[in-house]
Image (tube, helix red, strand yellow):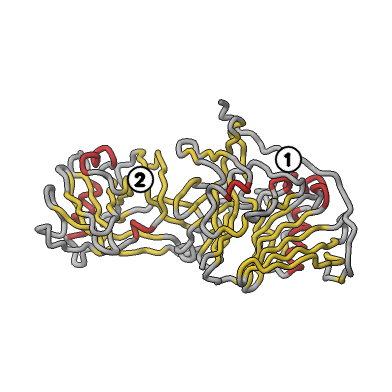
Amino acid sequence: MSSKVFTRVVGIGLVGLVALSGAATAWASPVTTKVLISRKTLKPGLTLVHSRITVRGVFGAQEVYKLAWKIGNPHVSLHSSLLGPYDGGTTWITDHVISHLASSGGPPGLVAAMTGDYSIYKSWSPTRSVTSGILVQNRRVFRFGTGSLAVGYKPGGRFVFGHPIVRPMKLDFAGGTSATVGAFNPSAWTLASAIRSDQVAVYTRTGQTVTVPAGAIGVALDSDALATELRGRQAGFTNVNGVNKPESVVAFRMTEPTAERRPVSMPIAAPGTCAQNVCQPGESVAVPAGGVVALARTDTVNHVAADGLEAGAQSGTPAVDTAIDDAGWGNVTDIAGGKPMLVDAGHAIARRPDSVDPWQWDCGGGCWRPALVRSGGSAWMILIGGKNGFGLTMPKFATVLATMGATDAIGFDNNNSAELWRPGHRPITGYGYERLLPTATSLSYRG
């Protein structure tokens, strides 16, 4: 099977004109008319509105599907949903149609799903792809990304835009050395193969008894920082403040260029089952409620992590320092890449960003477009397009969203990838068929 990167093939539908029915009402520029087709309450505080509009300079009517909710609604949550199995070795996702979420991969209480991040084909049989940007689901990292534009999903239907980067969590020691997390909950007899000398193994199961094996030491930390941060696996990371050799890391935090760093001090407990704060081989320590146990090796030439834990335990206030997700990203559960910001602080984009290629910008004259929108205290999933796949250029789409009241909006994959689906209903698309895709942005309602 070839691993060659394939560019996603897209098509342009025929331009069609949809006749407007009902009384058309004037709407602010660039929208010239608007007709309400239907309005449905799907759940309390969650509505789906279908309108038909005409847009100045655009040939044919445009269908508008807007799923709206109040930001902060405790029953609503957004998710990055994988449509098929994930291969951790390649980060490839087996593509499926969006309605596949009805039987596999959808979150509990699934109400609707919309197009996800742009993606790139990696194989044809089966069809598998990778997302263009970062991908996180339920605090698990599936694709690390490179700091491109993304949206982070929070509880209550909230979300944050930015350029997040996933970085390894580090335990910072006196003297400028540091350690990473190499394993979660490994068995004692595999510790030597699970972590390097500048790493720790972290045990997270409250009440679990951990017996320190030969060639190691352990400490109990009264902090859940190492247990609640992002999980994943990144091979080949080099800790320049450790042994400066490639290693696999499994714990991460989110950083964002415009957000404030959040340092945390993790107190070292004094368990009664160990003679000192640092537990020695043969001693046992229970994982404290709201905390973790960390083991480090002493059977290596260098003892970066072990020496750092020892020094922290002997300080006036026994503790180990680290940093957690940057400010504003701490309660993000899922992250999806997108491009670009269509509306920023009420202003529609006017110039093509470097991240958007010319075809995405105009689709040969216009195509179906999805977006996630913040409008004051409300939020929308929105899909706009016309007959036979014809629709709007990206700048025209952005202008329409701003006219509708969008404060901020981000775009996702468009044209024949643009879909909005609800369980039990046929997907809304520009071409009448579902496309094979790796991810979707889904919305659930619980309670």
Out of 300 and 81, give the one closest to the viewer: 81
Q: Mark 1 against mark 2, which lies toward the viewer?
A: 1
Q: Would you identify the image quadrant in which residue 441 lies?
A: bottom right
Out of 372 and 247, give the one closest to the viewer: 372
Residue at 67% x, 38% y: name it.
8
Query: Answer yes or no: do the residues labelled 1 and 2 have beta carbons within 8 Å?
Result: no
The residue pinned by badge 1 equals 10
Image coords of residue 356 (percent x, y): 68, 48
Position above or below: 109 against 178: below
Position above or below: 15 against 66: above
Q: Quadrant of the N terminus?
A: top right
Position above or below: 86 against 58: above
Residue at 17% x, 48% y: name it.
212
> SS for tag 2?
loop
Mark 2 neighbour density, 10 Å: few (under 14) some (14–19) many (20 or more): few
Q: Is residue 345 visible?
A: no
In the image, taking residue 303 as reference, residue 100 lies left or right, namely right
In the image, taking residue 440 as reference, residue 56 lies left or right, namely right
Sequence-first disc among 1 and 2: 1
Out of 212 and 156, give the one closest to the viewer: 156
Q: CA distance from mark 1 to mark 2?
A: 44 Å
- Extreme left residue here? 275
Q: Amino acid at mark 1?
A: Val
The residue pinned by badge 2 equals 240
Q: Amino acid at mark 2?
A: Val
